Amino acid sequence: MVRIALNIEISPKEPWSDILIAQLFEIDYDSFMDTETGVVAYINETDFKEEILQTDTILGSESDEFTVKVSIEKIPHQNWNALWESDFHPVFVEDKLTIIAPFHDTKLVKGMGIIIQPQMSFGTGHHQTTWMMTKAMMEFVPFPKKVLDMGTGTGVLAILAEKLGATDITAIDIEPWSVENTIENLARNGCANATSLCGDIELIENKEFDLVLANINKNVLKAHMQSYAKHLVNNGVLIISGFFETDVEELIEVASNESLVFVKKFTKETWAAIQFIKK
């Protein structure tokens, strides 16, 4: 499968790079690489539509607040992993968790270690949202047993859930290649309590969870909120991310309509995560 790399130089980088990532994420760009001058965003060639960049992102805007330069590169399938290996660095979540790739030296690990082969999936831990989700999860004592990881990507949150003590994990993604990547990463980390499924929210019918994890985007989170609440047990916990700090109040309001009570928020740069409890 051929991939498209969108090389974007934007000045000033903050906050425009983060705004652009959020917009690209909503139009099917699934992986992002931070650079000194901006970001590189990746999408399957079959999903790439250059005209949408002009209508649905700030790349089509004329502004006195920033300048932007974009170049487009095609990456043959066989070169994808080599590209990731050259730029994929270990991720440290404080001193409690390290996310590494198979080609990294395990001596780099601080605290708990997770091995992720990135391939094409979003969720390597490098993005602020994944970092906050893992931080929130590591604060549970004891850890919930039945867990849903919605929009699992590489499976990193499902893997962490099992390592923290979950015994029944459902990991769902709408992309078949993400599901395949999750299955591989689950095996790579010796996980036996997680099931990876391809599909959407309808796959959780007739299931209940102690913890729901959803690192997607604001619009999907709003559309799914009722389902998350419905399938949480009483006193169950929902943790969401994939949005900006400016979206927090809106999402708290949507959640409150579903008997989900705000507990705390996490922030990293301009991004946020929120923890709720079902009452």
Image (cartoon, grey):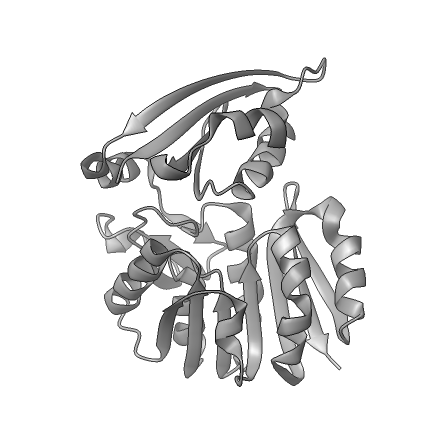
In the depicted view, which residue is nearer to us: 229 or 174? Answer: 174
In the depicted view, which residue is nearer to us: 248 or 74? Answer: 74
Q: Toward which corner of the image does residue 26 lie, by quadrant?
A: top right
Left or right of 272 in this view: 189: left
In the depicted view, which residue is nearer to us: 80 or 108? Answer: 80
Residue 178 x %, y %: 36, 56
Left or right of 198 in this view: 85: left
Instruction: Look at 41% across and 39% down and name the residue there.
Output: 47
Instruction: Look at 41% across and 84% down and name the residue there.
Output: 167
The image quadrant where one finds the N terminus is: top left
Instruction: Look at 21% across and 34% down and name the residue there.
Output: 79
Vertical side of 234 occupied by 95: above or below: above
Residue 25 x %, y %: 53, 42
In the image as oriented, which residue stretches furthest toward the left? 78
Vertical side of 136 occupied by 268: above or below: above
Residue 251 x %, y %: 74, 58
Residue 138 visible in the snapshot = no
The image quadrant where one finds the C terminus is: bottom right
Q: Toward which corner of the image does residue 258 lie, by quadrant?
A: bottom right
Vertical side of 34 occupied by 253: above or below: below
Residue 11 x %, y %: 59, 18
Instruction: Look at 72% across and 13% down and name the residue there.
Output: 64
Residue 70 visible in the snapshot = yes
Left or right of 128 in this view: 115: left
Q: Toward which corner of the image does residue 106 lie, by quadrant?
A: bottom left
